[in-house]
């Protein structure tokens, strides 16, 4: 075997082993990051009427209030909001799932980075926080963005027993509009409580 053929064989084998090692290390790092809660995959599921949503326990986080430790969970949801004409305004009350907690008080929202996306003229997506009267929407008549009259996230809990936390987005404007809501918040519950997401 000529020296150049031998070198080519060695380089080919080295490249193959290097690829195998790289794949092994990437897989190991991925599993480690997932075990630590530093890498997650959100799989949002839509219901018949509820928007797509997902919850996951934040394994390495806790929330302490007056010395009492709580478990922390993450909620994510997404839905195109299509209002209906109600009286003089176009209104939407969009269900985004129900967070059922086995015990304790109503969920406590402890961190919220929810956004609204509005298409501006069909070429630009404008995003704003879900900010009541400061939220951007897309006007149906012109396709341009405008500031909505009212937009907010609500978690309804009717107490006794405190198990159902109904997540909804409410929006209202005087002209026909649409926008996409991207909910992303963390909430705290009593330590050890069972938490489930019900999607209707």
Image (tube, rainbow, N blue to C red):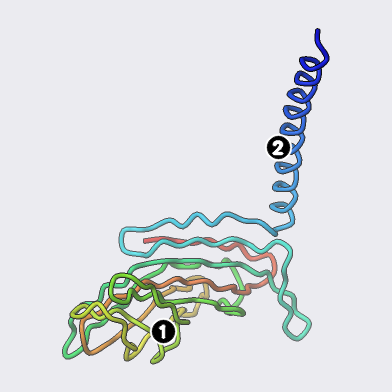
Mark 2 closeness class: few <14, some 14–19, many ≥20 residues within 10 Å: few
Where is residue 23? Give x, y as percent.
70, 37
Where is residue 105? Give x, y as percent.
59, 78
Q: According to the image, label 2 marks what residue?
A: 23
- On the rendered image, what quadrant is the N terminus found in? top right
State left or right for residue 180 relative to residue 24. Answer: left
Rounded to the nearest angstrom, the CA distance separating label 1 from label 2 is 45 Å
Above or below, 178 relative to 199: below
Q: Are marks 1 and 2 in contact (CB under 8 Å)?
A: no
User: Residue drawn at (41%, 77%), measured in percent from left and top?
Assistant: 116
Which picture quadrant has residue 149? Answer: bottom left
The mark found on residue 180 in the picture is none
State left or right for residue 64 relative to residue 184. Answer: right
Q: Depth check: 7 or 12 in front? A: 7
Where is residue 3? Give x, y as percent.
83, 15
Residue that sits furthest to the top in the current view: 1
The mark lying in front, picked from 1 and 2, is: 2
> Which mark sits nearer the N-terminus, 1 or 2?
2
Q: Depth check: 86 or 33 in front? A: 33
State left or right for residue 7 relative to residue 139. Answer: right
SS type, badge 1: strand
Where is residue 31? Give x, y as percent.
71, 46
State left or right for residue 83 relative to residue 16. Answer: left
Q: Depth check: 198 or 45 in front? A: 45
Q: What is the tally of numbered marks visible in this picture?
A: 2
Q: Depth check: 96 or 40 in front? A: 40
Which picture quadrant has residue 146? Answer: bottom left
User: Residue drawn at (41%, 90%), measured in percent from left and top?
Assistant: 134
Mark 1 closeness class: few <14, some 14–19, many ≥20 residues within 10 Å: some
SS type, badge 2: helix
User: Residue drawn at (72%, 52%), measured in percent from left and top?
Assistant: 35
Q: According to the image, label 1 marks what residue?
A: 152
């Amino acid at each position: 075997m000529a020296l150049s053929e031998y070198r080519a064989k060695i380089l080919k084998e080295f490249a193959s082993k290097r690829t195998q090692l790289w794949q092994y290390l990437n897989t190991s790092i991925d599993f480690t990051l997932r075990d630590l809660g530093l890498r997650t995959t959100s799989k949002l599921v839509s219901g018949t009427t509820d928007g797509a949503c997902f919850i996951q326990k934040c394994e390495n986080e806790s929330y302490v209030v007056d010395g009492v430790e709580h478990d922390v969970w993450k909620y994510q949801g997404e839905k195109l909001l299509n209002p209906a004409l109600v009286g003089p305004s176009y209104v939407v009350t969009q269900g985004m799932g129900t967070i059922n907690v086995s015990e304790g008080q109503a969920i406590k929202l402890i961190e919220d980075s929810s956004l609204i996306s509005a298409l501006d003229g069909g070429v630009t997506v404008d995003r704003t926080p879900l900010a009541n009267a400061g939220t951007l929407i897309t006007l149906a008549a012109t396709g341009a963005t405008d500031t909505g009259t009212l937009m907010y996230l609500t978690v309804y809990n009717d107490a006794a027993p405190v198990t159902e936390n109904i997540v909804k987005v409410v929006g209202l404007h005087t002209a026909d509009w649409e926008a996409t809501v991207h909910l992303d918040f963390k909430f705290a519950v009593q330590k050890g409580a069972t938490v489930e997401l019900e999607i209707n």
